[in-house]
Image: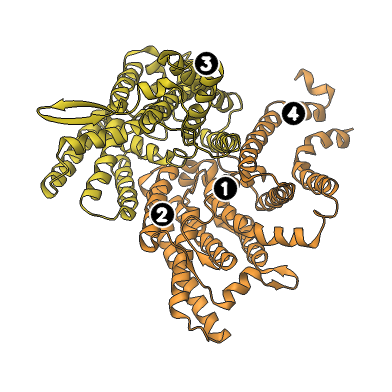
Amino acid sequence: MSNRSNFWVQLPAIGLPALLAASLAIFGLLLPGRFWSVGAFESMAFQMPELGLLTLAMFLPFVSAGFNLAIIVTANITGIFMAWLWVNMVPSDAGTGLQIFWVALGLLGAMLIACLIGVLIGSLVAYVGVHPILTTLGFMTLIKGVGIFITRGAPVSGMPPVVQFLGTGSFLGVPMPMVVFILTALAMLVLMNRTSFGKYVYMSGSNINATYFSGIGTHRVIIGIYVISSLICVLAGLVMNARFNSARMGYGDSYLLLTVLAIIMGGADPLGGFGKVGGLVLALFVLQIISTGLNLFGVSQHVSLAMWGAVLIFVLAAKFFNRRYYLPWAQRRAAGPDSCSV
Amino acid sequence: MADTKAKTHPDRVVLYLALVMLAIGAFFSLTTTVFLSFANLFNLLESYAVTGIFSMGLLVVLVTGGIDISFLATASVVQYLTVLVCRQVGIDDVLFLGLTVAIVIGACIGMGIGSLIYYLDIVSIIVTISMQSVLFGLLMHASGGRSIYNLPAWMFRYGGTHSFKIGDTAYVMGVGPLVLLAMAILTWFILNHTTLGRQLYAFGGNPEAARRLGVNLGRLHLFAYGYLGAMAAVGGITQVFRMEEVVPSSLVGRELDVLAAAVLGGASLMGGRGGVLGTILGVFLIGVLKNGLNLYGVSSYFSDVVIGLVIILAVIATHYGKRKETEVGFV
């Protein structure tokens, strides 16, 4: 009895894997031979990591009940810095060793820039109490301004071969951008589930005052959140550099909605405190499959934009009905008829 | 305690803003020859009137503790649909009917957004990020991204520029500043002199307390987002008056500029604060800065840097020391 009833309580948890399977099956049927092809899946594996890395960058602030509007510009500006360094410093006939040295140096510099951005944003949020949307809005404007001022809006192009390999090459059959994404997601998984910092992030998102008065240095946690968020943006910038063979302010501008969509589909609560890395990764796969499928159908970018917005509202509505009507019903059912009178 | 109260009083924010604006204005007047001329000031007023109209609507939503970044998509949709409806129904030269159509469309979209936020209990920023994409995506698909130049006659008749004389010199200006003035007075009246206005502030200050006092939160959501939708319609139509064309992609993407102006004027994302005068000052502070820097010969590429810095400094100034000693959350 109780096993069968608990089934209904557990049912919503399989929503996302079911959606993944359904979208794979539906597109497979509607696009015979074209969707289930090596080419389609390879292009998905090359496209997803940019969005995936930006989503991971949004994830930490989101779980802490914050928001980071500056992720895309941070990825852009660090990407521009790296591109500028490599275009100007790496000799065209440099060997692989020298190239790797410069790439590492560029990454280091970009990470310093990202740390500075993260510390500034985090300090304003933590010490002054400015709402994260406002803080990151200010930094987004500032960083975009700086980026456009130094590049005049033009792309910086011509990456060294090592970086180009990162955009087009494969390792054991897995595209390099995907390797970067999977490693970052694994690191995030460990950070959120196996470290005290991860616990503090969840606690801060649920109730930051309670966390603070439990003796946890929430100010440091908040600063850490925005620093890590900005550091992941560096990786997103690196992958974008590698894939486009250039860096420019404005690359990836349209990803903001999709990062939020992936996080919420993955099960995070917009009010903060909840959200799992695993759900997020699964949601990203679903989004990429739907996106590629629609692309193969020839749906225009404007229609897909409208559709993503509608999907986000639909997901939120479904969550609302689940929380308000379905779960209470399933729990009553699981508790059995005896408890109805209680 | 009394001291903190005085510091957070809305009049203080307006006073500081006015002083900063005077200082910046005086600096540009002394260092450039063009800044303090009627022609330039009218130009400034005209350029930022539409932003001001949008900010009036956004202010009402911010007062309730919500946020909306879909209003410029609403404005663009209203521009497009109004032209279509006027053509279909045959409203060619009746200003009143045309405006009614626009405002009804805007208010309906706004109330739709408000009911999603209230009835589905979703955070406003996420609903409005989605609605922005839905509205803008559908608009671009329907219009094919093409501009419309063949507008109903009332848009031309009352739009464009009107010349007038001060002394011997003739100046031209559109209707934007007058519309802004009317909308500012309307918003000020609603916020400060009606029960509805008090309820909006009460709701923003503490939703649960307001609900227990018997305030109908659902109705307030509908009003606040509906009002923003209506202001988006008025702003959108004023923009059409000014440009004499409908360009579907001309507005979307500048939502955060309007938000920044409202926040400069003392509104808080946590609700319950902000006023009309401060918001207008915020809009024109950004306007004066951009205009002055431009006259000063600073590259327009650089103005975003300055605006970003101003937003960051302003939020530090308005938030510093506002938090209760027992709290570490956002203000």
Residue type at mark 3? Gly
Q: CA distance from mark 2 to mark 1?
A: 30 Å
Give the chain of mark 1: A
What kind of element bears circle 4? Answer: helix
Q: Which residue has dot 2 on it?
A: A144
Look at 48% across and 81% down and name the residue there. Answer: A90
Q: Which residue has dot 4 on it?
A: A326
Residue type at mark 4? Tyr
Disc number for residue A147? none
* Nearer-N-terminus badge (1/4): 1
* Chain letter, colour orange: A
Q: Is residue A104 above or below residue B207?
A: below
Q: Which residue has dot 1 on it?
A: A202
Q: Residues within 10 Å of mark 3 (few under 14, many from 20)?
A: few
Disc number for residue B90? 3
Residue type at mark 1? Tyr
Q: Residues within 10 Å of mark 2 (few under 14, many from 20)?
A: many
Look at 50% across and 54% down and name the residue there. Answer: A72
